Amino acid sequence: MTSATINDRPVKSTSQWLKAYYFTRFAFSTVWVLVALSIAKSSAPLAAIMLVTYPAWDAIANFVDAQRSGGITRNWSQLLNFVVSIITAIAVAFALSRSMASVLLVFGIWAGFAGIFQLVTAVGRRKSYGAQWAMILSGAQSALAGIFMVKIAYGPAPVGIADIAPYAALGAFYFLVSAIWLTVSEARAAASRAAH
C-alpha cells in the first residue's frame, strides 16, 4: 500500500471497512463450520436453516461491501454475486425437498460463480488495497471447489452438510489472512510515516 493510497481519505476509509469486513466474514464462517460439523450433522432442521442461511449471508455481505466500497452500481461483480447468492438461497430451499445431493449440486454451481465474481472483485481492488492476493486465490479455489462439489453430488456416497464445511472453512481462512494482512500493512505504513 503506497503512502498516496493511505493519504487518500476515501481509500483509507474503505481499507478500514475491508479489514472489519474480512474479520466479520471469518467469524461467521468459522461459527458456521463448527456448528455444521457438530450439532447440525445430527439435526436436519438446523442443517436446512444453515444451508439456506450461508448463501443468503453471502448475498447480504456482498451487497453491504459494495455499498461501502463506492456503491453497488460501481461494483458490478459484487452485484452479480449478490444476485447469484440470492438465487442460490432460494434454490437450496427447493433442493432440500429433493435430496442433499441436489443441495450439494446447487452449492457447487454457486461456489463456481461466486468464486469467479470474488476473483474479479479482488483483481479490481489489488492496486488500491493490500491483501487482495488472498482474495484472488480464494476466488480461484472457490471455483475449483465448486467443480469438486458437483462431482461429489453425482457420486454414489451419501452427502450432508459436513461435505460443504471444508468449502466454508477455506473461505474463513482466506478472510482471516486478508484481515491480518491489511492490519499489518497499515501498521507498517503508519510506522513508515512516523519515521519520516
Image (tube, rainbow, N blue to C red):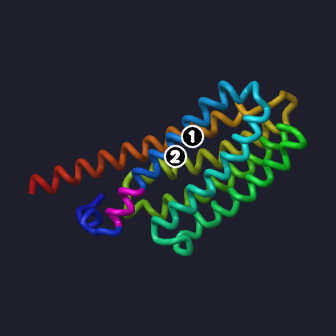
Q: Nearer the viewer, residue 120 or 182?
A: 182
In the image, residue 158 above or below residue 122: above
Residue 128, position as x, y percentages in the image: 37, 63
The magenta span reads: 11-17
Picture quadrant of residue 72 = bottom right
Furthest residue toward front: 45
Q: Nearer the viewer, residue 45 or 79?
A: 45
Judged by its main secondary structure, the magenta piece is: helix
> Is residue 22 rendered to the left or right of residue 81?
left
Q: Residue at x 12, y 54 (%)?
A: 194
What's the distance in space between the residues labelled 1 and 2, CA to CA? 6 Å
Amino acid type for the residue under numbered disc 2: Arg
Residue 31, position as x, y percentages in the image: 56, 35
Residue 195, position as x, y percentages in the image: 10, 52
Furthest residue toward bottom: 73
The local secondary structure at tag 2 comes to helix
The residue carrying mark 1 is 29
Answer whether labels 1 and 2 touch (C-beta < 8 Å): yes
The residue carrying mark 2 is 25
Label 2: few (<14), some (14–19) or many (≥20) C-alpha neighbours in 10 Å = many
Q: Nearer the viewer, residue 31 or 116?
A: 31
